[in-house]
Amino acid sequence: MNDVTRATAPASGNRIGLLLVNLGTPDAPTPGAVRRYLAEFLSDRRVVEIPALLWQPILRGIILNIRPRKSARAYAEVWTPEGSPLAAITRRQATALTGRFGADVVVDHAMRYGRPAIAERLAALQAQGCDRILIAALYPQYCGATTATAHDAVFAAVGAMRAQPAIRTLPPYYDHPAYIAALAASVRDQLHALDFAPDAIVASFHGMPQRTRDLGDPYHDQCQTTARLLGEALGRDLVVSFQSRFGRAKWLEPATDATLERLAREGVRRIAVIAPGFSVDCLETLEELAMQGRDQFLGAGGEAFAYLSCLNDSPAGVEMLATVIAEQLQGWIGAGSAANSA
Ligand SMILES: C=CC1=C(C)c2cc3[nH]c(cc4nc(cc5[nH]c(cc1n2)c(C)c5CCC(=O)O)C(CCC(=O)O)=C4C)c(C)c3C=C
Ligand SMILES: [Fe+2]
Ligand SMILES: [Fe+2]
């Protein structure tokens, strides 16, 4: 049974909390910090669905002795004065949304792995008088390895509280008109600013094991729907691929690296790459796509490559988040347009 008596009493009040949640990232681009991060991330049974008795010896004996050094070098390539891009941009999204829904909505952010921890930020929201909290896991497409594990962490924290806040979770927004419209405008604006007319646009999504899809995870289908709707909004077909394969199992296909090389070999000269499955730019987009992907495409004979940024904390990206979040706050903060009540 949970030890509910440990939880501190909430402050009285009837405010609303909005907790943005993202994946998490190392505290520093060093092998030690990356090792700590990967140990927590890759021990999550939602992320690696191999029995712990088999997996933990592989993780502790092999992966955590090899990968942190290599990944730390990659993180160092994209690190910013504000820290890891994922942390810095998520922080800025929270700042941009603060005050957006009125004075009674307290906005905060947390990471599934590392800091700021979900349990700590939930307690902080409660201490500020929030008796209703909306959890906005910032993944447009639902995946057990991202959305569900963030929610698991929330419910585990709430499970240890004597006085629980009411909890709502943001549904996946992979087909939301505001999300599709924001992506389409962002692609158009960036291509215009670069004066770049690509022969093909590749939409690269983070991969996952094929087995996870076979077991019923809707992630793959939601990625395909996003790409179809975005293609319709842009008036052109997108090439869909899946990146960041991890381990030996079969992952979703086609793989982004193989796709970039195939397109170049087939005579596609100019491509733009977008990453609509990532709400913020991070290691996987800035290093794996914008750096490695560029080398792969140009190395296979391509002539021009452009990586187009995620929505991040751009005004249009924040507007889109405000719209999808405001829909879930309805009833808590009253009728009317919650997004415009600042
Ligand atoms: C957006 C959706 C994501 C899915 C689905 C996902 C699944 C998934 N990832 C791994 C293994 C790794 N992912 C890593 C980084 C990483 N993954 C996502 C998002 C998804 N992952 C993001 C946003 C990031 C970037 C974090 C950052 O700090 O910028 C890494 C760490 C980096 C590295 O060492 O390569 C690993 C490992 C698995 C196994 C998985 C399974 C479904
Ligand atoms: Fe990942
Ligand atoms: Fe990667």
Image (tube, rainbow, N blue to C red):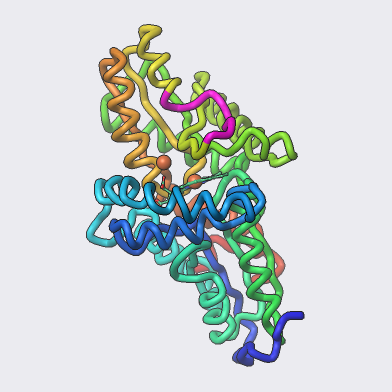
User: Measured along the vertical axis of the image, is residue 208 above or below residue 280?
Assistant: above
Q: Is residue 27 left or right of residue 255?
A: left
Q: Is residue 118 magenta?
A: no
Q: Residue at x 39, y 54 (%)?
A: 86
Q: Residue at x 45, y 20 (%)?
A: 259
Which of the 4 quarters of the picture holds residue 132?
bottom right
Q: Is residue 251 magenta?
A: yes
Question: Which secondary structure dominates the residues rendered in magenta?
Answer: loop
Whole-percent x and y of residue 301?
28, 13
Q: Which residues are magenta?
A: 248-257
Q: Residue at x 32, y 17 (%)?
A: 270
Residue 144 seen in this snapshot: yes
Whole-percent x and y of residue 271?
36, 21
Q: Is residue 153 left or right of residue 260?
A: right
Q: Nearer the viewer, residue 17 or 104?
A: 17
Q: Nearer the viewer, residue 218 or 312?
A: 218
Whole-percent x and y of residue 292?
32, 32
Q: Is residue 191 left or right of residue 77?
A: right
Quadrant including the N terminus: bottom right
Q: Nearer the viewer, residue 322 or 227?
A: 227
